[in-house]
Amino acid sequence: MKKNNDLEIKKELETVYVDSSGKKHLDYMEARCAETQILLYRQSKQKQKQRIMDIIELIMKVLKNENWGVFYKNQPMRSLETQEGGTLYEINQVDECEIEKVITEASTWDSNETNPISNQNKNFTTG
């Protein structure tokens, strides 16, 4: 019967490479490839954000140049009471910042459905 101190314990030291997402890799080239994919993904996301901002700026420029506005369809006007007892009507216009926010949110719905890095990381394991 062997005692615990008779067991051979081997310990091996290796270099572990950590990419910018925090994922650990034992192989240097594997880590470089993963980091390159992360960088490419970040660059494509940045380009996509810039395109969205360009579209928003274009839409807002056209609205201002044409003197157009966006209003709430379900309640296009709201009534305001005056001191004399009369009624004024004001167009229920959507604020510019709200238009920008909605366009930005709508554009992220499409991009979140297809994320190659997150899909790849689910299928990728290292030892």
Image: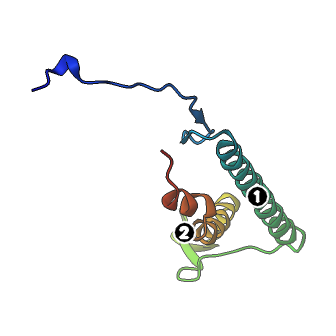
Relative to the observer, which residue lies in front, 7 or 114?
7
**Residue depicted at 53% across the width and 83% down the height:** 74
* Picture disc at residue 57: none
Cα–Cα gap, marks 2 and 1:
48 Å
**Residue kind at label 2, given as amino acid type:** Leu
Residue closest to the far top:
5
In depth, the one of 12 and 66 nearer the eye is 12
Check disc 1 and report the residue beneath it: 44
Q: Position of residue 33 (x, y in %)?
A: 70, 49
Viewer-nearest of labels 2 and 1? Answer: 1
Which amino acid lies under the numbered mark 1 shown in the image of this protein?
A: Ser
> At x 13% / y 21%, what residue is drawn?
3
Q: Give me the disc on residue 80.
A: 2
Residue 63 horizontal/vertical position (percent): 82, 71
Q: Residue furthest bottom?
A: 74
Query: Contact, CB < 8 Å: mark 2 with mark 1?
Result: no
Q: Considering the numbered disc 1 on the image, is that residue within a helix, a strand or a loop?
A: helix
